[in-house]
Image (cartoon, grey):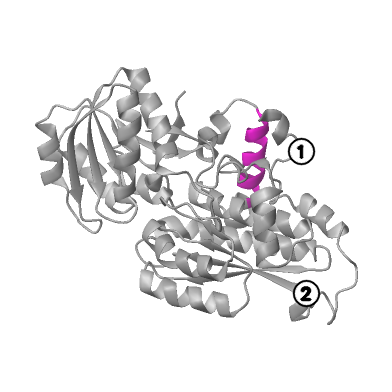
Amino acid sequence: MKQMLKGKVIALLSLAFLLIMAGCAEENVASGEKGESSQDDVIKMGLLLAETGPASTLGASQVKTVKLLQKQLDEAGPINGKTIKLIQYDYETDDTKAVVAMDKLLSEGVVAINAATQSSTTMAVMPKAIEAKIPFLAGAPIDVENEYVYSTVHSPRVIAMPIVDYLNKQGIKKVAWLNAADGFGVTGLPAFKELAKENGIEIVAHEEFDATATDMTIQLTKVRSKDPEAIIVWSRTPGAGIIARNFKALGFDIPMIQSTAAANEGFLEQVKDDNENIFVVGSKLSVLDQLPDSEQKELLKEFKEAYEQEFGEEPDLFAAHVVDGVYAFVEAVKAGNTTAEEIHQYLANDLGAFLGVTGTYNFSESRISPEPDGISVLAIENNTWKYIE
């Protein structure tokens, strides 16, 4: 794998890299002045993200990442005479509105789709991309395999891997499981059950809660009676933060480990100043300065610095998903592919293994998840993420 990755490290967010790409482009644009392009010279990628509504705690960094990428692509200029346009719509944390926005993107001639911030939304719009035979870069964990679907996020099983590693290192063999009863929440337990069985870990209790609930004390009280050695939670913010606060209020003295859907600044704010024994599966991007030197660290540093310079804040795992999806698309265009089918064939057969901000991908071998090398169980110390090996 390491040999395959040589020379295949994502560098999309490096302006210097983009300028090199532009240097390979044709100097003459078909029409217009000052970089203007005709419709034939524009290649469009559509993105559906939760810029507003409850899921904006996850989508906010994604929207900013799109703006950063578009700015850098514009500064770099055309690639092989083609201008890339990222068309992003806010679906307002509403699956119905997302479907309407998806129809609009398709009518505008996009040749690839990156969607969406939430699992339920991703599932709602994905069939339209499949029907249209457009490569669909899934932006949230889903349990679907289709030739036109490429996941830019970790599958539930891969997210569960660092949790099981942590439990094994701590000698924990009895856990309680709580999840939101929504599109994302229900995906975790089946995957975790398989890994738990393989590692001799017993699930002694399981409770569900409404993703919009404002108190989960009842569920936590029920699992407490089963004497678990750790609690695992599969929910996005704000529910993830509410259950963490309830956990602290009840005085639990065991670890609570949450999924990647809690790996954002919104969650940190929810548990501010009272977060001992609360852990999250998060991106190594969030603990960059704590990582040993590596090729991966340099890649993460490049993205983080570009994002911080533009927005004055740190990016998160959700931003990383967008970066990697757009990177794969740009690589296809660089290779001379301009139609949806050409881009699909390139992703499926020619892109090969590459190290992204989220982790290592190889769509030729697996389209359901990157490898777990970009994530880790993180602790919280001084109200910020702490890397634990």
At mark 1, the secondary structure is: loop
How would you rate the neighbour count of disc 2 (Cα within 10 Å): few for under 14, some for 14-19, many for 20 or more? some
Q: CA distance from mark 2 to mark 1?
A: 28 Å
Kindly identify which numbered label has been placed on residue 7.
1
* Residue topped by disc 2: 41
Identify the residue shown where x is 40% and y is 70%.
92
Identify the residue shown where x is 79% and y is 60%.
336
Residue 313 shows up from this direction: no
Query: How far across and how far down the image is residue 81, in percent?
Result: 83, 68
In the image, taking residue 268 as reference, residue 217 lies left or right, namely: left
Residue 160, image quadrant: top left
Query: How far across and how far down the image is residue 329, in percent?
Result: 66, 58
In the depicted structure, whether residue 221 falls above or below residue 80: above
Outermost residue toward the right in this view:
27
In the depicted structure, whether residue 138 falls above or below residue 247: below
Residue 141 shows up from this direction: yes
Magenta part of the protein: which range?
A: 294-306
Q: Do callouts 2 and 1 mark residues in contact (Cβ within 8 Å)?
A: no
Kindly identify which numbered label has been placed on residue 191.
none
52 or 175, nearer to the observer: 175
Identify the residue shown where x is 68% and y is 43%.
352
Kind of residue at badge 2: Asp
Q: Residue 303 magenta-drawn?
A: yes
Kind of residue at badge 1: Gly
